[in-house]
Image: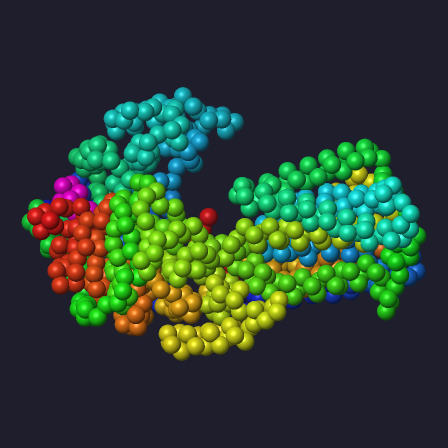
Amino acid sequence: MSRPDTGQTPVLRLENIVKTFPGVRALDGVSFAVMPGEVHALMGENGAGKSTLMKVLGGIHQPNEGQIFVEEQATVINTPLEAKAKGIVFIHQELSLAEELSVAENIYLGELPRKSFGRVDWNKLFAETNEILGKLNVSFDAKARVGDLSIANQQMVEIARALTVDAKAVIFDEPTASLTDAEKVVLFDVIADLKSQGVGIIYISHRMEEIFKITDRISVLRDGQYSGTLTTAQTNEDEVTQLMIGRSLDLSRNVSHGELGDVALEVRGLSCGHLYQDISFEVRRGEVVGFYGLVGAGRTEIAETLFGLRDPSAGTILLDGKEVRINSPAEAIAHGISLVPEDRKGQGLVLGMNCRDNMTLPQVDDLKAGPFVAEGAEVAIFDQYRDRLDIRTPGWRQLVGNLSGGNQQKIVIGKWLSMHPNVLILDEPTRGIDVGSKSEIHNLIRDLASQGYAVIVISSEMPEVLHVSDRIIAMYHGELIRTFSSEEVTEDNLIQAISGIRSDKVA
Amino acid sequence: MAPGTLSNYLKSGAIWAFIVLELAFFSIAGEYFSLSDKAFMDFDNMLLLFKQSAPIGIIAMGMTIIMVNGNIDLSVGATYALCAIVLLDSMTWPIFAGLGDAVIPISWALALLTGVLLGALNGLIVWKTGVDAFIVTLGSMLGYRGLVFMYNGEQPTSHLNWTLVDFAEAQFLGLHTATWFLLAVTVAIWFLMNRTVHGRNAYAIGDNRSAAVNAGIRVGPHMMINFMIIGFLAALSAVVFYSESGSVNPNDGELYELWIITAVVLGGTKLTGGSGSIVSTFGGVLAIQLLRKGLAHIGADTSTVNLVIGLILIAVLFLDRQLNLKGKEELRV
């Protein structure tokens, strides 16, 4: 299968790993192996199971089935500490460093060398740290305060921390997300170094360019399943893309039908500091505009600006042809803009409240009878949208936290529909939702458009944007790369646009 | 039964079960240890218990809103003392001389206004600076207490108005004036929290602030209103208590904030916000007062009372945590 016959023993091998959560099969029989001295890319769309797999390796989740082998010895990893002790170390995308402490203290956090009476052996600490830093060829020393270092150097501290143990496998999770090009070169040098020492490396990234530059093999996950391993030198971006997106879920391409209304929302030259620059687009009534790009491309930030959560640094927003300033969500709502946020539980719902109260939250002030809330009117609204959106719940008294992800999302959507918005923005509307509810929500989005709503859908899942959108805006690093009509878009030109590859296809 | 229902019942009923337990314990223990011949559950004794619960209980209702909203107010004890000074001192001001008993409503209004203003100041700072309410009210606790001492030095401020004393000591349908105030406040705040938009939004803000913001709720004004309410209630509590006593020491109301928070937390309100009930806070207030009175009844001194209440508080919160953890996949920390 995924083991090349080099006669070597893989440093890390996964066999048929299954991990289920209530209602979701997050990992479904994943197997692959990492050889010593190999850089092995792990790819897949958001939600394909990469992070769950890493949590299984890191001892945060226990697999329901399957086995992990470290140097061909069957291993159970119960805690992050055990993972480290077995030589599996992680370089996380989000750095977990104590900024007020020195580099040395961070590297040996929890394992500071000691002298008698529990005193820290500072001399030994700094000497050992400088030795490791020497190997990494970095510009700071063991006594530097971590908070004073650049992000790239902080990442080096994380890497140095990994090197304090006899690392067999090092896992890099989107390591270049916040690095400049020059900093990337240094990182790649370090990876090459580790590789030459016989360490196995798992490299998680969305960026094709990097994958093809530094990896030896590429394994792809799709919907929690292992969908294949390719040898980097013998494949190309198209083939990898195929493995990542070729799914069986019914996601036929949307065909626009031309029957569009007036421009409901127009954005001209909108910028917000370094988050995104010079964004212009328009959304007509009856149209779904999809925003596609990698995490961090600036899509969510544009939505937050339109919803009054961020101040733009330049540019104008026009609603029905009139320029507006939106200073708060309350003002956005008054202008008829609604946002179904990316983080449903964190930003969209009050989990400790019941279904009805969540659905009427933005308009409860308008539903008063004297000083008190008119609960009858609230129940009427809830009933109406429960039927319209087919929300499955025992009743309005049910706490929203007890519903499935799909039904929770329908509550959020119902909340805004009951306010009759002009523009509906949905950020990752099907994240963490099972396949069945996914297509219900897709159908709902198409329905809303045909009823004349202007809809913006932000998604990191290509089949989803292709399925629901009339037009697709591709973003990369805060820039609007290109707007595709549904006729001209292909999976290839879309994935290239959002990976920052400016081939001649992307004129 | 939906998951969590059982533990919810256990939690909302727990405070009342605890009160029953206290009553039973002190009744029986009282037979053996009490120095007086009177039974603990004597009717007059219970009426007195309600009356004595009033000063802390009235403020605890406000603290419940504040904590459901996700904030905390440490300055209530100092606000209470300052309002008491305004109440008693204003009755002696020369401009009101010759008004006779007509000065009473004026002094009450002045004291209540003082409370609202002090609360508004807290709320405004929390709203506009975004500094945590714990820090802001820690500062105002010290600041307001400083004002109390600036007013009259170490000396007590005294003024006895016999009409007021008669009013405060009156009993209507058997209950003391202070008890009526406590009950009225409890009912009013219950309606505020359970039937009005403001109450609904307070829960939403405390449970999930960003979801509340995303629903267009203006978080700042709601927090400010809540601080004004608790300021008003601290003043009302002072009005009720000092109408009878007629003398305020500059140290009065110290540690009130901690007793009040203890009562609210015993009643099941979460420190992190979003969850809490007025009725349970009422139970928490009674439970603490019962404990103080009961321990005194069986001859324990004040230091023992504090020790026991401290232990019980920790035991209750531990129990609460166990009930909440059950059945959830909590991350190991």
Q: Position of residue B111 (x, y in %)?
A: 77, 48
Q: Is residue B65 visible?
A: yes
A46 left or right, relative to B134: left
Residue at screen point 40% across, 59% down: A335
**Pick the front one: A344 or A421:** A421
Q: Is residue B96 magenta?
A: no
Task: Specify the quadrant of the image occupied by residue B145.
Answer: top right
Q: What secondary structure prevails in the magenta region?
A: helix
Which residue sits furthest top?
A123
Is A262 situated above or below B262?
below
Q: Is residue B287 visible?
A: no
**Pick the front one: A171 or A308:** A308
Is B75 situated above or below B152?
below
Span colored in magenta: A205-214
Total number of numbered labels? 0
A230 left or right, relative to A436: left
**Pick the front one: A419 or B303:** A419
Residue at screen point 60% across, 65% down: B196
Q: Position of residue A350 (x, y in %)?
A: 48, 61
Task: Specify the quadrant of the image occupied by residue B200.
Answer: bottom right
Residue at screen point 78% across, 64% down: B24
Q: Position of residue B280 (x, y in %)?
A: 66, 62
A127 left or right, relative to B291: left
A188 left or right, relative to A89: left
Residue at screen point 10% across, 54% down: A238
Q: Position of residue A6 (x, y in %)?
A: 10, 46
